[in-house]
Image: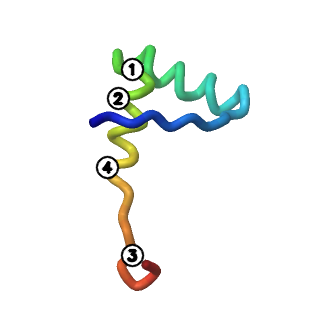
Amino acid sequence: MNKSVFFRLTEGELAHLEEYCQISGRTKSDVLRDLIRKLKINKKLS
């Protein structure tokens, strides 16, 4: 089941994301999902 997450970006952050998406031909959701999947988790902090 898919869930939604909403968060705020500055105008600059949004512009940066939109420019990246335009250049790469990817959606904002696709880019953000890929970045989240690449996050490293330090098990000692959990």
The residue positioned farthest toward the front in the image shown: 1
* Residue 26 at x, y percent in the picture: 35, 20
Q: Do the residues labelled 2 and 1 touch (CB within 8 Å)?
A: yes
Inspect the image, locate mark 1, and give the three-letter code of the amino acid beneath it: Thr
Q: Name the residue under label 3.
A: 42
Q: Residues within 10 Å of mark 2 (few under 14, many from 20)?
A: few
Cα separation between marks 3 and 1: 29 Å
- What residue is rendered at 67% in x and 35% in y? 8
- What residue is rendered at 38% in x and 57% in y? 39
**Quadrant holding the N terminus:** top left
Answer with mark 4 or mark 2, whichever residue precedes in sequence: 2
Cα separation between marks 2 and 1: 5 Å
Q: Name the residue under label 2.
A: 30
Q: Are marks 4 and 2 in contact (CB under 8 Å)?
A: no
Cα separation between marks 1 and 4: 16 Å
Inspect the image, locate mark 2, and give the three-letter code of the amino acid beneath it: Asp
- What residue is rendered at 64% in x and 33% in y? 13
Inspect the image, locate mark 3, and give the three-letter code of the amino acid beneath it: Asn
Q: What element carries label 2?
A: helix
The residue positioned farthest toward the right in the image shown: 11
Answer with mark 1 or mark 4, whichever residue precedes in sequence: 1
Answer with mark 4 or mark 3, whichever residue precedes in sequence: 4
Answer with mark 3 or mark 1, whichever residue precedes in sequence: 1
Placement of 39 over or under 22, stated as above or below: below
Mark number for residue 27? 1
Q: Mark 4 points at which residue?
A: 37
Q: Is mark 4 on a helix, strand or loop?
A: helix
**Quadrant holding the C terminus:** bottom left
